Amino acid sequence: RCLVEEIGVPLARLGGVLLSFPRLLTLRAEDVLRPVAGFFRDEVGMSTEALGKVVAAFPQLLAMNVSRHLRPTVQWLCAVGVAPDKLERIIRQHPKTLGYSLDRNLRPKLHYLCDEVGVPRDRLGRLVAAFPQVLGLSVELNLRLTVQYLVEEVGVSRARVGKVVATFPQLFGLSVERNLRPHAAFLVDEVGVPRERLGRMVESFPHLLAYNLDDNLRPSVRYLRDALGVPQGRIGRLVAAHPQVLGYSLEEKLAPMVDYLVGEVGVPRECIPALVQRCPKLLGCSIDRNLRPTLRFLEDEVGIPAALLGAVVAKYPTLLGLSVDRNLRPKLDFLRHEVKVADDALGQIVVTCPQLLAYSLERRIKPRYRLLSTRGLRLGLHSMLAPTDQAFYQRYGDGLASFPAVARALLPSDDSATGNYYWHKDMAALAAAAASA
């Protein structure tokens, strides 16, 4: 009665729970069961329904002593950086976590991850919260073999492997022989990723190694080749540059994006293969949250005719990945109000050379305009922005030595930083998809 009404074990699962752990029948409700249940409710914040599911999965929890075992383990988890609001999720996802010995299992395991693998200590809590199963894996039979494979065969840098597994600790749950090695062979032999670039690719997106070969990766490669027309010989380098492209859903992301670019934006169908090769990140953007607002901005505020938007996108697709509020609009305001570019000329300029809007406002546009202004010179946008720093400052300044002085007079800002490009926001979604694959 206590198991069902107070602890929340589903009645339909009670028989199986007692069969798997018959010792439950010998545990007194007052002395053992209720104190354990009270600990999970009052100190962990777990509901009765959640506790019942945890006990059904791992009934041995109810036999553990609160003061000698459960509370010290929970306190240790918080001490290594697990957020208190993540404790319930960890226990529900992997209830055996609380059954491991602190001295024989938990502390040595995290010592290995930090001191030998190189996982930053400030990321331990998030690592455990993301993949608590790592606490039950053997250092010698699982963790060390995975790290050795990533470094010695895949080519992940020894200095960066700690951050790789901190980013995606689920790698430790994948078998080297059944998962990791077949994935690496597929990427090199079938996709065409250059072997020397495999390690860097995994460093940038380790989640790719968790996607199902037949359900996810092979269909994505076929779609890029057969539906979009990307030459087989180019797919490997495309994936090496942006491995996330193989994680996008065909039905929910890739096909709708191509239909939108061709059908609504007006990108010529024959330009799609080149567009995808030049800017595969564009395929991960949201049509409604990113592309439509950007195209509306280009048409309404920059002054590009709707009929020419497709040609502009085909010529420079990266433009659609730039944030309107953080990137494009500040540049437009500066060009209009400071550089005094006429409204009717701006759209024509961008149609001719759309990459002008991709140059950094703080590191390229402002310093060059400032230098020209001090010299009483006025150039067209293309002449002002297109030349390399070396060519520009040798011609209009005192060589490259003048560039730092000009740049320091401004507040530097890197337009490549997260937030200025829409595709930075898709990493979390892809990571979640890989973790559940």
Image: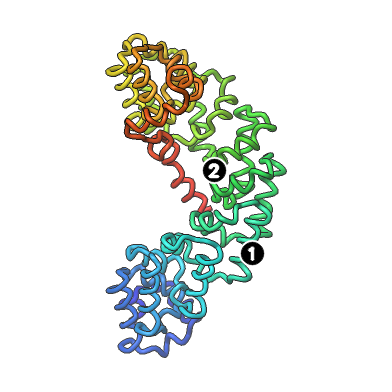
Residue at point 43%, 75% (across, down):
98
* Whether residue 10 can be seen here: no
Q: Residue 186: where, in percent of width, then height? A: 68, 46
Q: Which residue is mark 1?
A: 145
Crowd rating for badge 2 (residues with CA inside 10 Å; few <14, some 14–19, many 20+): many
Kind of residue at disc 2: Gly
Kind of residue at disc 1: Leu
Q: Residue 158: where, in percent of width, then height? A: 59, 56
Q: Which residue is mark 2?
A: 247
Residue at point 34%, 84% (across, down):
67
Q: Nearer the viewer, mark 1 or mark 2?
A: 1
Residue at point 49%, 16% (across, down):
311
**Image quadrant where residue 68 sits:** bottom left
| Vertical position of residue 55 compared to residue 285: above or below | below
Asked which colour scheme the image uses, the reply is rainbow
In the depicted view, which residue is nearer to us: 208 or 217? 208
Crowd rating for badge 1 (residues with CA inside 10 Å; few <14, some 14–19, many 20+): some
Q: Identify the element where label 2 is drawn.
A: helix
In the depicted view, which residue is nearer to us: 13 or 284? 284
Q: Residue 413: where, in percent of width, then height? A: 37, 35
The mark found on residue 176 in the picture is none
* Whether residue 308 can be seen here: yes
Q: Identify the element where label 1 is drawn.
A: helix
Q: Residue 29: where, in percent of width, then height? A: 33, 86
Q: Earlier in the sequence, mark 1 or mark 2?
A: 1
Is 164 on the left or on the right of 36, as rendered? right
Q: Quadrant of the N terminus?
A: bottom left
Is 180 on the left or on the right of 259, as rendered? right
